[in-house]
Amino acid sequence: MDNEALLRGGLVMSSPDLERDPEKMCDSSNCFPLQSMETAKAETLCIFGTGDFGRSLGLKLLQCGYSVVFGSRNPNSSNLLPKGAETMSYAAAARMSSIIIIGVHREHYGFLPGLAEVLKGKTLVDVSNNLKINQYPESNAEYLAGLLPGCKVVKAFNTVSAWALQSGTLDASRQVFVCGDDAKAKEAVMDIARSLGLMPLDQGSLLAANEIENYPLQLFPMWRLPCYICAAFTVLIFLYCLVFEVFYPLTTTKEDTSYLIVMTIANRVFPIVSLILLALVYLPGIIAAIIQLYRGTKYSRFPNWLDQWMLCRKQLGLVALAYAFLHAIYTLIMSLRYYVRWWSNNYLITQIKTNNTYPFSNYNAWLSDSYVALGILGFFFYVLLGITSLPSVSNAVNWREFRFVQSKLGYLTLVLCTAHTLVYGGDRFIYGTFYRWFLPPAFVLSLIIPCAVLVMKFILIVPCLDQRITRIRQGWERKSRTVCPGH
């Protein structure tokens, strides 16, 4: 049986008292290693530090059959450690193992040079993180290697939290980035990670440690630009709708329509921003194609702003999908509003009082049904694009299938959503009564970028241009590079 199967079996046969009392389960002093004689490993691992991460990692190692010894500055006061682990002084614990996991912060490395002779030739696994990105000139792992030049330093486990280790890594990321200058030491650490049910990823030499240490400190790095763009458009469209729907009636007819802010204006902002963001997902690809056509080569870097824009297209699309969801929810509950119910009742009462029946309009019926149908279809493909962007789904399809969904169906989604907005507007584009202070209705603004994107895409798929772009992306260049004589 493999270690994972034995671990699952151990979990089933855990103590009934622990299953009944969740508080006891959270107390590492009451946690017993889940191991048997068949799975016990001869190797002993040493952990310097008895903090939350050190205790959680030690418990996980014990459960997977390792012998664990803790090194502590106060061996007799460490009473929260998992049963089955020994606690000794740093020097005594280091002599018990060839692999020492350094579970202390960088500012507490001062005791390590005094153990240089004991640690010489051993593998030190640095698991530390900093409080902010690039806090020190060099990474903690490189600093540790400089303190103890006779040791083999490996950076690992800093991207895994104590909570993830306690939960069995079932509810958290299993990826562990590993780097180091000694190949054998690095492979030994990666074997330990695999036995814990984690997925080690070799990142190369110790020079990669700085990037690995910065990774857990990054707060949605790929989401910043999309969120800034979304926030900017949201504020601008909201202010525009505020002027159009609230300020204009207030200044011209003294009518207070501020109640529209909560529902009506919100339900204008969400679909408008969603459609603009969806168009912005496909606009950089068109700009890149135009640049390649102009330069006649693909072997030239795009401007940095275009590179950054193209890298965050997935996040832009997901933010746009979130706004589309809000628009769908707002639309479904629109009939529950007091204003809508009042308007509907007043409409009926007006017909009764005037003894008039407004005739059925076939044009308006077609317009309404087409608008709703296009919205439903556009939202369906919108959701489909979002689902295929999930790693678990995208990993199950090949590149051609993924490209078909994200490109072909993506443009179809843009066409449907743009048509949905056009049909919603109907003939209001041409009547001046719908313009206030010479400003067009808000939905007209939402059509500028999508229509421009679709027009440019239509031009680029003309056979002569499409074939030229395809040839350029396959390596063809308009002008071959000149070769100097003798080279």
Image (cartoon, helix red, strand yellow):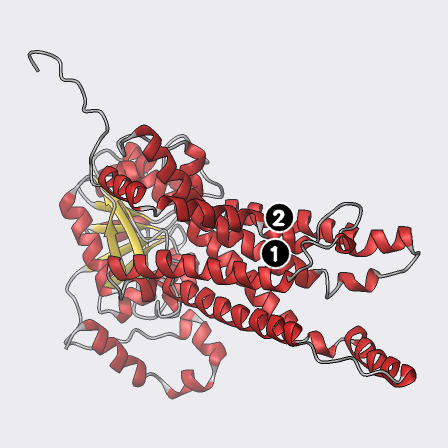
Q: Quadrant of residue 147?
A: top left
In the image, is residue 182 above or below residue 269?
Answer: above
User: In this rendering, does residue 416 appear at all?
Assistant: yes
Q: Earlier in the sequence, mark 2 or mark 1?
A: 2
Residue occupied by mark 2: 233
Q: Is residue 148 left or right of residue 315?
A: left
**Residue at 33% across / 66% down in the picture?**
392
**Residue at 65% across / 56% down in the picture?**
443
Say which amino acid is labelled 2.
Phe
Say which amino acid is labelled 1.
Ile
Q: Are marks 2 and 1 in contact (CB under 8 Å)?
A: yes
Q: CA distance from mark 2 to mark 1?
A: 9 Å
User: Looking at the rendering, in which quadrant would you find the N terminus?
Assistant: bottom left
**Residue at 82% across / 64% down in the picture?**
259
In the image, is residue 373 above or below residue 270?
Answer: below
| Residue sitting nearer the eye, 45 or 418 | 418
Q: Which mark is residue 451?
A: none
Q: Callout 2: 10 Å neighbours few (<14), some, many (20+)?
A: some
Q: Quadrant of residue 173?
A: bottom left
In the image, is residue 54 above or below residue 150?
Answer: below
> Which secondary structure, mark 1?
helix
Residue occupied by mark 1: 272
